[in-house]
Image: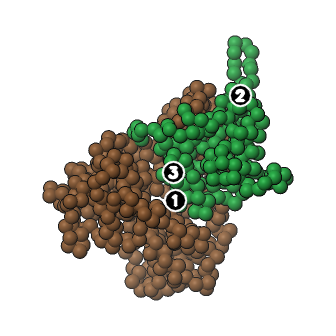
Chain colours: A brown, B green
Amino acid sequence: MADYIIVGNGAAALACIDGIRHVDREAPITVISAEKHPAYCRPLISYALEGRAKPENMGARADDYYEKNGCTVLYGEKAVKLDPAAHTVTLDSGRVLPYGKLCAATGSSPFVPPIEGLDTVEEKFTFMTMDDMLALDAAVKPDSTVMIVGAGLIGLKCAEGLAGRVKSMTVCDLAPRVLSSVLDEEGAALMQAKLEERGITFLLGDTAAKFEGCRAVMKSGKTVDFDVLVLAVGVRANTALIREAGGAVNRGILTDTRMRTSLPDVYAAGDCAEGYDASIGANRVLAILPNARLQGECAGENMAGGDRVFDNAVPMNAIGFFGLHALTAGRSLAPDEGGEIYEERTNGGLKKLYVKDGLLIGFELVGVMERAGICTSLIREKIPLSTLDFDLMRRGATTAAFSPEVRRQKFGGAV
Amino acid sequence: MGSRTRGNDMKRIYVNEKWCLGCHLCEYNCAFANSGRTDMASALKGKPIYPRIRIEEAEKTAQTGKSAQTEKICYAVSCRHCADPLCVKACISGALTQEDGVIRIDRSRCVGCFTCVLVCPYGALSPDGDGVMQKCELCLRNAVGEPACVAGCPNRAIVYEER
């Protein structure tokens, strides 16, 4: 009998394996992997399109990782039904596997909106997986005209990956700015300008209302001709397995700070999970890689009998195009909630620090990246700004802003 | 995150702030040790250097009674080789790994995304001239074999020991 089953084989799944093995070196682990590849570094797919990463060098772990960790990976299998009372999971092949503890690390899937005439488009792609990337890679030619629906991280990284490989690219988004879920207007404008420098055309506040073969008719009435279409509107957490088993699901699978779902012995981690987000003090899907790893590891340790709590997740995003990088963490201030914003603009760079109730609650940095993680630590660890020289810190992130005692703690011993 | 057993049984680089003169020699010794060259002039002269250890410098004015005193702070910072490293967990490319406690970077895999810079609480990673990240690997993988910053520190402010 398999003691542990992990549904999924991405970043959260690997971290879950690591977490289990911190506590339990022995009991077998079964990994159910819908994708037919060993786990790979998913965010590298845009770099592969660009030629900066090679598919054969994108593996997330060493080749012998699963074997060394006592894992059996079932490639190309999907978990279709969970029976929490019987502690079994059924695969699409009909096989029924018993489990002691199970972790849903099922990730998310591209959301494809029901746009009229989408079925008339021949060359259409999503951009989430290695296979998506390989299909798109094979479809584009130097004379391709590409249309990307969605100016979020996925759509724009795809655009960066294709830049220089195709004749033209148009990116549209219903939102009035690029990267609207991560950057404010000013930061977004800087990133958009960088992308436009490379010949990418934007249609913002507008989206495809209808497709007619190789033509998109926009909501505004404009038309865009293309021969390759990429749909990057957004993603949805893969929650069906848990929801259909009666588990609590909102936009993601609801978990507590030990990554337990509402079902006994069932945990969830990564993009499918809706865990505690300390920046807003509530549960939220935080579909970012560090979170997948931290949640996965926490879930794994707890599945194996440990007692780990993960209660300081905050949004953290590093986004870069053509050498211009934006780093954000935490959250910004709502217009009516008070607090202070420290702003600084330098040639092409932008720094905004959001302070509330004596704490740094978030920042947005564009083009000024140096030692940003020190500011991230202020947010994650909720360090009162009264205990440090914030004037010094906001001029440029530095540990020199901490008191001598704190510096001695930070640098004087093992951490 | 919760409390995992800390891996204290390894040598790390420690800096005694009181003894650091802010002379920047550690930065030069680091850049030279990792240059792959055999003489310092051809490695460093007239070139921008990208050391993996950096001096943090600041001036603070402390008010004692009626007189203000300006205090100069300086100390060297390099990777702490955290037992539970956030940079490794956040790395999108698999470039950062931890083996026997030492956090290493495979520069052939790094795509320069800055996620590690975003999460390192010490500010210990920075890009080199090619936009690829670099960090202290304790000189274990270069020809020097042990930390060059430690060997070259004129006031023994930087030490390599187990604590």
Chain of the residue where label 3 is placed in the rendered structure: B
Q: What residue is disc 2 on? A: B19
Residue B125 vs B3, above or below: the answer is below
Q: Earlier in the sequence, mark 1 or mark 2?
A: 2
Whole-number angstrom distance, CA of label 2 to CA of label 3: 31 Å
Q: Residue at x 73, y 25 (%)?
A: B71
- Mark 1 or 3: the one toward you: 3
Chain of the residue where label 2 is placed in the rendered structure: B
Horizontally, is A163 left or right of A99 in the view? Answer: right
In the rendered image, which quarter is residue A49 located in?
bottom right
Q: What residue is disc 1 on? A: B94
Label placed on residue A171: none
Q: Position of residue A271 (x, y in %)?
A: 39, 58
Horizontally, is B107 left or right of A219 in the view? Answer: right
Residue occupying the far top of the picture: B65
Element on which disc 2 rests: loop
Between residue A57 and residue A226, name the one nearer to us.
A57
Between residue A219 and residue A203, name the one nearer to us.
A203
- Mark 2 or 3: the one toward you: 3
Q: Are marks 1 and 3 in contact (CB under 8 Å)?
A: no
Residue B126 vs A174, above or below: the answer is above
Q: Earlier in the sequence, mark 1 or mark 3?
A: 1
Horizontally, is A338 left or right of A312 in the view? Answer: right
Label placed on residue B99: 3
Q: Residue at x 58, y 39 (%)?
A: B12
Whole-number angstrom distance, CA of label 1 to CA of label 2: 37 Å
Residue A73 vs A15, above or below: the answer is below
